[in-house]
Amino acid sequence: MKTYKVALVPGDGIGKEVVPAGRQVLEALAAADNTFRFDFEHFDWGGDYYRLHGAMMPADGLEMLKSKDAILFGSAGDPHIPDHITLWGLRLKICQGLDQYANVRPTRILPGIDAPLKRCRPEDLDWVIVRENTEGEYSGAGGRVHQGLPIEVATDLSVMTRAGVERIQRFGFKLAQSRQRKLLTLITKSNAQRHAMVMWDEVAAEVAKDFPDVKWDKELVDAATVRMVNRPASLDTIVATNLHADILSDLAAALAGSIGIGPTANINPERQFPSMFEPIHGSAFDIMGKGLANPVGTFWSAVMMLEHLGEPDAARRLMQAIEHVTANTRLHTRDLGGAATTVEVTSAVCAEVAVTARSPLATA
Ligand code: IPM
Ligand code: MG
């Protein structure tokens, strides 16, 4: 039997509720499947760890993760610690340190979900946002000079390397090619940003030559928000820089019904390091500890983890189970307008996973 070593990093806020829920569902799936198992290791990194040790994770934390097959992450953020410390001390440190340069964010309107766009049918919104995840506006380059004085200067430098741009765009084109519509939209802002974004466009034109069967176009990031709302069916695979995709993926999640549902994969495509899977919702302090968090974003992220680990059947069964559960509005959490709890949704998905286990019906 195959064993997958998975690091669990719940982090902060509702991460501490949804990651254990994700573990439970993965265990139910493995028990029903009986061809693979998980060897989970829990890491208590995040805000509480910071209060005790003055760092979000230990100095050799990345080394501890390197021996894993995958990482299931919750969220980073604490009301009493500045956001840039929690982010750079944990999530970005892992993404950059393990060179997880492809951040992949699928968005669909799942069954039973009441999405806000009036004229958008579920089949009109089926996107995957591919976000550059290691450089660009999140490079971390920049600094503050004359700090605290009236002449203070502060810079955040967006750094784009040709290699970094090319590898994310190649990843995006490959992904687009694997999807039915073979359609890619490159998000840019080369009308206003005349250096890096111009190179970004040029590299895309070069990479596109290797994918003659992929139809592609360019959209300015501001215009892309309008297109997502007015013509959602004209989009499929969307490739964007770190910050642009950050913003567009929140809009995408809202248009699909709730930010509580959206998954993310932080992928190191070369598999030199483990990849990391996480819901996009963040730590949500307003509801933490109340059992109200929607675990669906974590479950869908677990589906992406199973695909990455090479368990496509299990991934499909888990996705089916999730969709059966979202189809039942009595099992909607508060973000979806319902009253179900994290525990109720988790138990329902575990029960679904058990009935669809490797029975001939399940694959029919
Ligand atoms: C996301 C989040 C993070 C980001 C935050 C928590 C810094 O918004 O994963 O989209 O901006 O990358
Ligand atoms: Mg975001």
Image (spheres, helix red, strand yellow):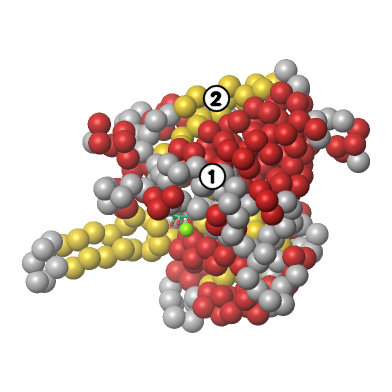
From this viewpoint, which residue is outermost toward the top?
1
Q: How many marks?
A: 2
In the rendered structure, the answer to whether residue 92 lies left or right of residue 333 reads: left
Label 1 sits on residue? 278
Task: Classify mark 2 as within 8 Å of ligand 1 or not, answering yes or no.
Answer: no
- Residue at 69 percent across and 54 percent down: it is 329
Q: Nearer the viewer, residue 356 or 268?
A: 356
* Residue 74, above or below 108: above
Return the x and y of residue 229 as percentages of the image width and height. 62, 76
Mark 2 surroundings within 10 Å by alpha-carbon count, few (fewer than 14), some (14 through 19), many (20 or more): some
In the rendered structure, the answer to whether residue 170 lies left or right of residue 85 reads: right
- Residue 92, can we see it? no
Q: Nearer the viewer, residue 286 or 32?
A: 286
Q: Considering only order in the chain, which callout, 1 or 2, is on the residue closer to the N terminus?
A: 2
Real-space CA distance between mark 2 and mark 1, rounded to the nearest whole angstrom: 16 Å
Q: Amino acid at mark 2?
A: Phe
Label 2 sits on residue? 40
Q: Quadrant of residue 110?
A: bottom right
- Residue 123, can we see it? yes
Mark 1 surroundings within 10 Å by alpha-carbon count, few (fewer than 14), some (14 through 19), many (20 or more): many
Q: Quadrant of residue 114?
A: bottom right
